[in-house]
Amino acid sequence: MLRIFRQVALWEAISTIILFFVAMPVKYLLPHFMEVPEDIRLNTVRIAGSIHGFLVVIFVILLIACWQSFNWNFKRVIAYFAASLVPILSFWVERDVQKIINKEKI
């Protein structure tokens, strides 16, 4: 379960960056510089936002499942959840879970 959670944390972080730094600029900034069809502008955010939203829901479900299965303290759960809200900090969750996985191998 930790490996799956780690992968979801990584993909959630990537989807956040794509949403904030690719899809939203296409929707809001690109039309100021060139002609972009409205369906492309709207669909980039809709598609990227839907994928990101799905991954956030899976992330939270897995976070709760790991909390219960591995008896994580509440502080860790809150830190992981808070980190998932900030695009760059989401990568820290993936790295931290990898450290936990590595400790279990020993």
Image (cartoon, rainbow, N blue to C red):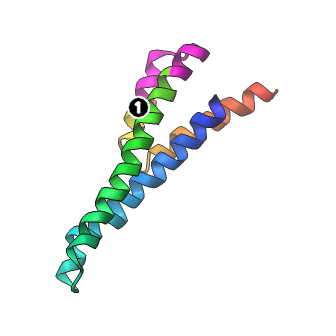
> Which residue is tagged 1?
81
Q: SS class of the residue under badge 1?
A: helix
Which residue sits at x=52%, y=19%?
Answer: 67
The residue positioned farthest toward the right in the image shown: 106
Membership of 27 in magenta stretch: no
**Who is closer to the viewer here, 91 or 36?**
36
Quarter of the picture containing the N terminus is top right
Horizontal arrangement in the rendering, residue 103 relative to residue 90 (left or right): right
> Vertical placement of 40 versus 18: above or below?
below
Pointer 1 local density, CA inside 10 Å: few below 14, some 14–19, many at least 20: some
Q: Amino acid at mark 1?
A: Phe
- Name the magenta segment's main secondary structure: helix
Q: Residue at x 44, y 45 (%)?
A: 89
Residue farthest bottom in this picture: 34
In the image, residue 14 lies at what x, y percent?
48, 54
Looking at the image, residue 47 sits to the left or right of residue 103; the answer is left
Q: Residue 60's quadrant in the figure?
A: top left
Residue 78 percent location from the top left of the image? 40, 25
Q: Is residue 72 magenta?
A: yes
Q: Which residues are magenta?
A: 65-79
The spot of residue 23 in percent (x, y) is 33, 64
**Vertically, is 47 above or below 100?**
below
Q: Residue furthest front?
A: 39
Residue nearest the viewer, comparing 60 with 44 = 44
Asked whether, in this view, residue 83 is left or right of residue 93, the answer is: left
Residue 15 pos. (x, y %)? 44, 53
Residue 29 vertical position relative to residue 35 in the rendered view, above or below: above
Front residue of 54 and 93 = 54
